[in-house]
């Protein structure tokens, strides 16, 4: 399944979410990304919510009122996997296999492949 790539602003905001351990709100995001005005950030957050990348989970206090906080619904790896067309999977996997740094990582990948093979046989 292929999905439409995130815009530059959407991806920058999602990177902050992917790098942070917990929910974030407009106030928290504006501290990390001060170059964005609050209106722009609100529009991007709404779009990310509507497309299933984030979901509202609570409220943060900004000193005057509370603003909604959001948590990640789709991880970065899941997003990247959605961008790959079916006919690109094998060449991409081959390229990634060439970059595996250790036997332990290769063994872990092999176990995942065997698991998927068993799943497809059933």
Image: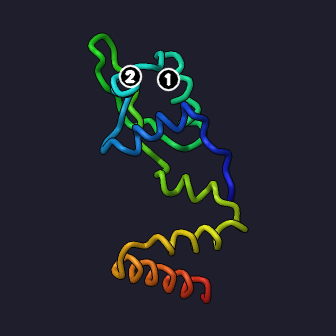
Label 2–label 1 contact, CB within 8 A: yes
Residue 104 in percent (x, y) is at 33, 80
Nearest the eye: 101 or 1: 101
For label 2, the SS is helix
Q: On the rendered structure, is 77 left or right of 27? A: right
- For image coordinates 54% across by 87% down, the residue present is 118
Q: Which residue is the site of mark 2?
A: 30
How crowded is the residue under tag 2: few (<14 C-alpha within 10 Å), some, or many (20+)? some
Q: On the rendered structure, is 51 left or right of 62? A: right
Residue 5 in percent (x, y) is at 64, 44
Nearest the eye: 18 or 74: 18
- For image coordinates 49% across by 57% down, the residue present is 77
> In this picture, is 119 found above or below 50?
below
For label 1, the SS is helix
Q: Which mark is residue 41?
A: 1
Q: On the rendered structure, is 57 left or right of 85? A: left
Nearest the eye: 102 or 58: 102
Q: Which mark is residue 110?
A: none
């Amino acid at each position: 399944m292929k999905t439409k790539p995130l815009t530059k602003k959407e991806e920058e905001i999602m990177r902050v979410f992917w790098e942070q351990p917990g929910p974030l709100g407009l106030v928290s995001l504006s501290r990390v990304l001060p170059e964005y005005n609050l209106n722009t950030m609100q529009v991007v957050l709404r779009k990310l919510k509507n497309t299933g990348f984030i979901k509202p989970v609570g409220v943060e206090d900004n000193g005057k009122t509370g603003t909604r906080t959001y948590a990640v619904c789709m991880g970065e790896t899941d997003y990247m996997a959605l961008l790959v067309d079916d006919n690109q999977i094998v060449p991409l996997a081959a390229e990634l296999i060439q970059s595996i740094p250790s036997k332990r990582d290769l063994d872990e990948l092999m176990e995942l492949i065997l698991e998927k093979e068993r799943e497809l046989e059933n």
